[in-house]
Every structure is written in C-alpha cells, then in structure tokens.
Image (cartoon, rainbow, N blue to C red):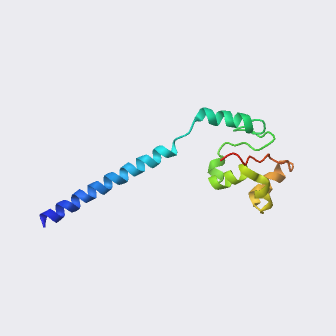
Amino acid sequence: MKSVAKHRTILKYFVSFLTFILLVNLQLSAQTGDPEKGKNLFNANCAACHRLDQKLVGPPLEGITSQRSNQSLHRWIKDNNELRDSGDAHAIAIYDEYNKLLMTPFPQLS
C-alpha cells in the first residue's frame, strides 16, 4: 500500500512538473517576435494612414487589440474589402466613418 501511495505521489509531482514546463514553453513561444521588424513593417505599410492616438486617414490603433479579436484584425488587414462585403457591421461602420476610403489590402501579411 505504501508503495502505491508513494508512486501516486511521484506521479502527481511528475505531471505537475510537466504541466509547468509546458506552460512556460507556451508563454515563451507567445513572446517571440522581432520588435524592430514590427516597427519597420508598421512604418512601411501603416504609418502613412495610422497613428496610435490620433485619427489620420484611418482610425487610431491604440487599444485595437482589446476591441477586436486577433482573427478579426487579421481578416481586416489581409482584405478589409472582403470583410465589409461579407456584411461585417464594424467594417462597414469604419468604412462609413472614414468617408468610404478604401484601405489597401495586405494579403501578404500574417
């Protein structure tokens, strides 16, 4: 009996350890990226129309990730015209608010 209890205890610690390692790895993989490349990408493709905290040709981007899902943002960036044509109410509202100006689609971005 003591042997079974001892094995269960060891198994619990082992599973806990593996879970911890998995969570740490997931967290680290979520943080990968190159901020300099991101800055260059933004400057080359977005900065002419967007700022973080002010309206330009397009809406300000500050807090956008808390307002829209990643999937929705990816769809918008890749082809906002398609998103609007699908009937997405938010896409239509942004289009109307910004004088029906078309945002350049960026299908090459992920």
The count of marks equals: 0
Q: Is residue 5 above or below residue 98?
A: below
Q: Position of residue 1 (x, y in %)?
A: 13, 67
Would residue 103 appear left or right of 40 to someone viewing this image? right
Say whether residue 26 is visible.
Answer: yes
Residue reaching furthest to the bottom:
1
Q: Position of residue 59 (x, y in %)?
A: 76, 44
Query: Residue at (59%, 35%) from the top-left corner?
Result: 35
Query: Residue at (78%, 57%) from the top-left corner?
Result: 82
Say whether residue 69 is visible.
Answer: no
Would residue 86 appear left or right of 23 to someone viewing this image? right
Query: Residue at (62%, 34%) from the top-left corner?
Result: 37
Q: Is residue 86 above or below residue 94?
A: below
Q: Is residue 54 above or below residue 88?
A: above
Query: Residue at (78%, 36%) from the top-left corner?
Result: 48
Which quadrant of the figure has residue 75? bottom right
Would residue 99 appear left or right of 25 to someone viewing this image? right
Q: Position of residue 103 (x, y in %)?
A: 80, 47
Q: Position of residue 27 (x, y in %)?
A: 46, 46
Q: Is residue 41 above or below residue 20?
A: above
Residue reaching furthest to the left:
2
